[in-house]
Image (spheres, rainbow, N blue to C red):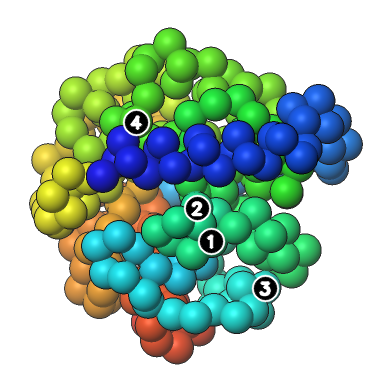
Amino acid sequence: MLDSLVAGALADASERRATRSLAEVESAALARPAAIDALAHLAPADRIKIIAEVKRSSPSRGALAEIADPAALARSYETGGASVISVLTEGRKFGGSLADLEAVRAAVSLPVLRKDFIAEPYQVFEARAAGADLVLLIVAALEQPLMRELYALIGELGMTALVETHSAAELDRAIDLGAGLIGVNARNLSTFELDQDLFGTLADRIPAGVVKVAESAVKTPADVAHYRAAGADVVLIGEALVTGDPVATLTEFLGS
């Protein structure tokens, strides 16, 4: 599934590049105001921090929410106390777009994450051109030399990379990269099964000073508390927010 998602994302990027060249996207990216410092917003604090996700659907769950107005949802997230807004921009399985990212960027003052299957520089320039402050890099989808190249480019553009891992071996690769923001995703990308305890088994391996993000399997305040007790600085939440009252849910989760 991951290979299919990456291939689809690259094919879609190739189509966009046919109408908007790399040079044009790079120029637009460099013309953007400076990216917001996401690490400052996600720095460890007395309570958990939340990356709130604009997410219409997923391969594992299908349609989740229509989200006709992603900007309005993002404003609700900001009101509810989120620290960062994540926007799915993959269209085939997640129903997202760069237009969603642009709308969210214009609507909130928080850092915005482009969550997609990033595997070439063009997509990184697209992210900054659309206003992203963070870009997701999935270790399982990238060979180390390419990941280093993309990680360096993200930094050169003033953005922050959220480096996502699913195992001890992938975590070692993220650490070797020097990542300052590392996520551990509870969802197995091959089977889509969830292991909420994976974060806890890997958290102690993450160096001091690195912001630790727990991803997936967050449906209740107890889930947030579970991750917090295991050492998470941040949790990334999508489904629970788009399928309920986002402000009330964030308020409840932040009190965990």
Residues at discs 1 and 2 in contact (Cβ within 8 Å): yes
Mark pair 1, 4: CA separation: 19 Å
**Which comes before the other along the chain, label 1 or label 4?**
1
Residues at discs 4 and 2 in contact (Cβ within 8 Å): no
Residues at discs 1 and 3 in contact (Cβ within 8 Å): no
Quadrant of the rendered structure where residue 248 is? bottom left
Residue 84 visible to the viewer? no
Mark pair 1, 3: CA separation: 13 Å
Q: Which residue is mark 1?
A: 96
Query: Horizontally, is 253 left or right of 54 in the view?
Result: left
**Which comes before the other along the chain, label 1 or label 2?**
2
Is residue 155 or residue 231 the one in the foreground?
A: 155
**Residue found 60% across the figure and 58% down from its top:** 97
- Residue 10 is situated, as x and y percent measured from the top left of the image, at 50, 35
**Which comes before the other along the chain, label 3 or label 2?**
3
Secondary structure beneath disc 2? Answer: loop
Q: Which residue is mark 2?
A: 90
Query: Horizontally, is 78 left or right of 230 in the view?
Result: right
Query: Horizontally, is 27 left or right of 133 in the view?
Result: right
The residue type indicated by label 2 comes to Glu
Q: Which residue is mark 4?
A: 141
Mark pair 4, 2: CA separation: 15 Å
Is residue 205 or residue 16 the one in the foreground?
A: 16
**Residue found 18% across the figure and 54% down from its top:** 192
- Residue 109 is situated, as x and y percent measured from the top left of the image, at 72, 62
- Residue 142 is situated, as x and y percent measured from the top left of the image, at 37, 24
Secondary structure beneath disc 4? Answer: helix
Between disc 4 and disc 3, the foreground one is: 4
**Which comes before the other along the chain, label 4 or label 3?**
3
The residue type indicated by label 4 comes to Ala
Q: Which residue is mark 3?
A: 71
Mark pair 1, 2: CA separation: 5 Å
